Image (tube, rainbow, N blue to C red):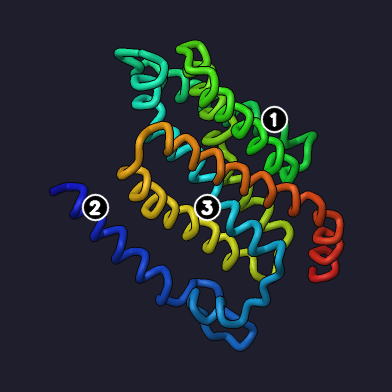
Amino acid sequence: MLPVIAGVCIGIMGILAIFAPFPATSEAGKSESFISNLKNAHFSIESIALILIGFTSTATFQLWLNCAQNFAKENAGWANPSIMQTYYSAGTLMALVVTSLLTRKIKDVRFILVYPVICLVTLVAVLIGHSQTLMIAGAFIIGWAGAGGLLQIVTSVCNMLFPKIKGTVTALVMIASSLCNYTILTAASKMAPSHVMIMNIILTAIGVLLGLFVNARYAKMVSLAESDE
């Protein structure tokens, strides 16, 4: 019953967030809602790529969370793989600290490519390897590179590269993430663990391609962002 109530509350808040006016005011002095901002926004291919990364990056760690232990039971012969969650959480916590330090010396946009590549290699190794050691290592690495702040880095890059529509793009990134939580997990619930792992590899590979595209266009986007300020 409690999940249903929580879902209803989240739905109501989502509707209010879409249609209610923001506290900020426009040049004309009127508050603008998300819908009005969306209508006036001019999206580029790069901004759409970042929105899609919100979907793929969420898929990487959510699919792992929801299928990795079943995959370990069926393919690695591990009777009780619950310890994987501990390693996953440890990777996530360490990433939050270490990544925040690394971003002081490395551009945020680089992590949008590097972290999905790390996740992709890890997922392929886990799918092929079928060993408990790989499952433990995979849990830690996916916790680090998949769940340890990648989605937040995407929103940070949105804020920097699209100053005129940063609020709108950031909101759409989070909406894409939420849609992933529903659509992908619904699909995964009807699939075998090995098939879920393959789906995760495909979505993560798409995230790598999107990250590569954003990084390739980064210099041009920075110059455009600076000219808009």
Secondary structure of the residue carrying tag 2 is helix
Lateral position of residue 135 relative to residue 212, left or right: left
Rendered residue at 41%/76% (across/down): 19
**How many residues crowd around disc 1 within 10 Å: few (fewer than 14), some, or many (20 or more)?**
few
Q: Earlier in the sequence, mark 1 or mark 2?
A: 2
On screen, residue 22 above or below 198: below
Q: Earlier in the sequence, mark 3 or mark 2?
A: 2
Name the residue beneath numbered marker 1. 101
Number of the label disc, if any, that sits on residue 209: none
Secondary structure of the residue carrying tag 1 is helix
Q: Which residue occupies the extreme bottom position in the image?
A: 28
On screen, residue 109 above or below 225: above
Name the residue beneath numbered marker 3. 55
Q: Position of residue 88 (x, y in %)?
A: 46, 24
68 vs 179, nearest the viewer: 68
Q: Earlier in the sequence, mark 1 or mark 3?
A: 3
Lateral position of residue 220 relative to residue 189, left or right: right
Secondary structure of the residue carrying tag 3 is helix
Lateral position of residue 227 relative to residue 65, left or right: right
Q: Nearer the viewer, mark 1 or mark 3?
A: 3
Rendered residue at 65%/31% (across/down): 118
Rendered residue at 48%/17% (across/down): 130
**How many residues crowd around disc 3 within 10 Å: few (fewer than 14), some, or many (20 or more)?**
many
Name the residue beneath numbered marker 2. 6
Q: Position of residue 86 (x, y in %)?
A: 41, 19
Q: Which residue occupies the extreme left position in the image?
A: 1
Q: Quadrant of residue 201?
A: top right
Quarter of the image that includes the C terminus? bottom right
| Circle 3: residue type | Phe
